[in-house]
Every structure is written in structure tokens, then in C-alpha cells.
Image (tube, rainbow, N blue to C red):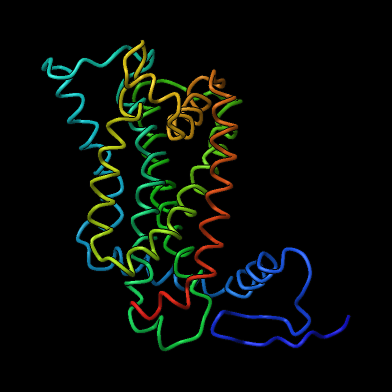
Amino acid sequence: MDNQKIIYTPEGQKAESDSGLFLISRQMLRELASARWLVWMLFLRDFSARYRQSALGIVWAILTPLITVGLFVGMSHSGILMIQDVNIPYPLYAIIGLTIWNLFTVGLTACASSLVNAGSMVVKINFPKVALVLAASWQGIVEFLIRLLLIAAVFIYYGVAPSSGGLILGLFCVLPLYLFMTGIGFFMSLATGVMRDIPNILNIGLTVLMLLTPILYPITGNSWLARANVWNPFNYLVNVPRDLIIKGQTEMTNGFVLASILSAIAFYAGWKLFYLAQTKIAERI
């Protein structure tokens, strides 16, 4: 095999003979391959920093959905909020939906601050900046895996079994949501470098979006919100995995396929934008 000379530039790694179709995509993949070990090291650093000085540590990943679902159960019992019958115990329905949704919110929030949190490291050291965003995105995966233990405990508590055939498929169908989150995370990390208010705006926006999406309660009928959710990709990216886990089937296949395609496009577009802009944004960090 011929040895290619690799040239390191402010824009990233480039092979001396780079040319032809999909040049930028090949450069992006080369940079990603070279950053595998760095992504893992940065993830371990972020994981340790996130929980090291916390009194309860990873227990917060379990307490947060329990408190949220408890509030909705309390409002339902008091008549403040009327929640339709979901054919399974409501806490189980809500915790599964919230666990899937939090994969998106936790990962996206971490991605948005990843470049800024790296500080002078971004400016002073030449390394693949994509590693910072990818390592941050894994925080969402960690909390998702922790909360799967909570879901298993709630299944046991209520004496309900998940669909044996749909469980693995349902977990696999969470992948498009992760791709969507990471794609938007690339863009948000750049935006935060320009405007530090982005994380605060993002937290408010995610809370509103959660309440407008059928995550903690079903939205049916012919209301304006039900019609709007036909075009809401998160409706499919959250509810299809939940339906598969609970029932082993879903009626949202077409919407999920379109939402998955959108997720793949968002991932590639965000990654490419980040690759092209990362050197320029470093001046603003």
C-alpha cells in the first residue's frame, strides 16, 4: 500500500493527493477516525467532572424523571391536568417517553457548551474539535442507559412485561434521535461560541417543545396541537420506540421513516458545517 503524506493545516488533516469527488466528506471521515481515542478520553473526563462533585452522583439521572412524572401524576389526580387513558400504568408510559426524550435534551445541552467549556484548549492546541462535540453527546447515552434500569424496575413494580419482539427494535429505533441531537449539537456548539446566551435559550426552548410534543401525555383528536404534531419529527422519534417497547408495533411507520431521513440529513449537515467553521469559531471562544 502506498504511504500517503498527511499535511496538518488549521483546517484539519489533508492528504497530499486529496482530490476528486466527496473530498470534504472523506476529510471529515479521516478526521473522525483519527479522533477515536480522543473522543473516549474526553468522554471520561466529562463524565468524571459531571458526577465527581455531586453528592448524589448518577442518582440524579433517576430522581429527575421520577420527580417530573410524580408532578404530572399529582396534577392528574387533582384534576388540574386531564390525561387520556394510555392502556398501561401512566408512570410507566411517562418514564419511557421521558427517558427517550432526555437522550436528546441532555446530549444537546452538553454539545452546545462543549466548545466553550474547552476554553483556551480550543485555541492553543491543534486537535480534531469534532471530538469535543461527540464526547459531549455521549452524556445523553449514559443517562439513557442509567434510566433503562429505572424503566426495568417500573415494569417489575407494575407486573407488566415489555414486548419481547419489540424491545430490541425499540431501543435500536432510538438511534435516529441520537443522530438528530448530534447534528443540531454541532450547530449549537458553534452558535454558543458566538453568543453565550444560547444554552439558556436552549433550555427554555426544549422545555416548551417537550410540553407541545406527546411525550408525557398522548395528544389525539382534531385539536390544533394534534394537527401540528403530524409535522413534528419528535412525535415519531419518541413515540415509535416507546410503542415498540410497550406493544411491539406502531402505527407511525411512515412518519418515523421520514423523521429518520431528516435526522440523517441534520447529522451530516451539522457535522459538515462544524468541520468547515471550526477554525473560524475558535477565534471567538
Horizontal arrangement in the rendering, residue 129 relative to residue 92 (left or right): right
Horizontal arrangement in the rendering, residue 23 relative to residue 235 (left or right): right
Horizontal arrangement in the rendering, residue 8 relative to residue 246 (left or right): right
Residue drawn 57% across and 38% down? 260
Vertical position of residue 188 compared to residue 61: above or below: below
* Between 88 and 177, the one nearer to me in the picture: 177
Image coords of residue 199 (percent x, y):
27, 58
Figure disc tally:
0
Image coords of residue 204 (percent x, y):
23, 46
Which part of the image, by quadrant, shows the C terminus?
Answer: bottom left
Which part of the image, by quadrant, shows the N terminus?
Answer: bottom right
* Between 168 and 101, the one nearer to me in the picture: 101
Residue drawn 54% across and 61% down? 271
Residue at the extreme right of the image, as rendered:
1
Image coords of residue 246 (percent x, y):
48, 23
Vertical position of residue 280 compared to residue 256: above or below: below
Give residue 31's quadrant in the image: bottom right
Horizontal arrangement in the rendering, residue 260 relative to residue 29 (left or right): left
Vertical position of residue 231 compared to residue 4: above or below: above
Residue drawn 20% across and 24% down? 73
* Between 245 and 193, the one nearer to me in the picture: 193
Image coords of residue 91 (percent x, y):
30, 26
Residue drawn 50% across and 85% down? 126
